Amino acid sequence: MKDINVFIGYIFLGLSLSAPIGPINAAQMDKGIRGGFWPAWVVGIGAVSADILYMLLVYFGVIHLLDAPFIKAFLWLFGFFVLVYTGVESIKNAGALSADESRGGEASLSKSYLSGFLMSLFNPLSVLFWLGIYGSVLAKAANEYPMQQLLIYSGAIVLGILIWDISMAAASSIFRKILTAQVLKGISVLSGLSLIAFGFYFGVQAARLLF
């Protein structure tokens, strides 16, 4: 019973880590409004792939190398370009949204995956999170549980993130079906502005490290 409670606790940890509004949530909302459930969900899958990569780096102790100021500055800078580019594209294409789009333009799934993967991979907040939170969870759990359980609990965190991604993709695709074209355009522009704002935040952090 205790193991089940701990497992559920780690699922909730994964959910709570994904819930704060950030670049991935904004991108998922934008993709969902444009292309429906699948493109939005695949953005989340791309982000989860990067998260799993960081989990492995923490697990093998390699992530401390990413703490070097030069590497951090590179991550912030690349994150800035990825987010601003995605945000500008979102605003630029908002005018092309129409109520009929729900029957046609499925966004490229490979492009959606790459977008989510790069956003999460070059997000230094991901590095800080996995180093800080997952690193401390891992250190605590390693003292209390055998290796097999440790992997199961790490899987529970990923499961929580996936549940949130499915919820976001479903919500955005439902909005797409029930809202008018004008409202959808407005949401798409807001998503784009949100991504650009996150991008400039990343840019400021890069400038602070470099200068």
Image: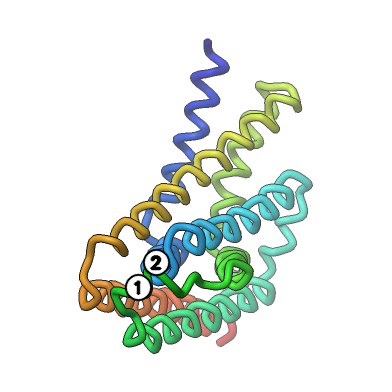
Q: Please give the name of the residue rendered at 56% of the width and 57% of the height, measured from the top-left corner.
A: 128
Whether residues under marks 2 and 1 lie with C-beta atoms below 8 angstroms apart, the answer is yes
The answer to whether 61 is drawn above or below residue 153 in the figure is below
Question: Which mark, residue 45?
Answer: none
Q: How far apart are marks 2 and 1 (CA)?
A: 5 Å
Q: Please give the name of the residue rendered at 67% of the width and 54% of the height, measured from the top-left corner.
A: 54
The front one of 194 and 140 is 194
Pointer 2 local density, CA inside 10 Å: few below 14, some 14–19, many at least 20: many
Relative image position of residue 124 (x, y in whole percent): 57, 66
143 left or right, relative to 128: right
The front one of 108 and 15 is 108
Relative image position of residue 2 (x, y in whole percent): 53, 13
SS of the residue under disc 2: helix
Q: Residue furthest top?
A: 1
Q: Please give the name of the residue rendered at 31% of the width and 79% of the height, measured from the top-left corner.
A: 98
Pointer 1 local density, CA inside 10 Å: few below 14, some 14–19, many at least 20: many
Relative image position of residue 125 (x, y in whole percent): 52, 62
Q: In which quarter of the image is the C terminus?
A: bottom right
Relative image position of residue 208 (x, y in whole percent): 51, 81
**Residue 123 seen from this side:** no
The answer to whether 162 is drawn above or below residue 143 in the figure is below
Rendered image quadrant of residue 175 = bottom left
189 left or right, relative to 53: left
Residue at which label 2 appears: 26
198 left or right, relative to 7: left
Q: Which amino acid does label 1 sit on?
A: Ser
Residue at which label 1 appears: 191
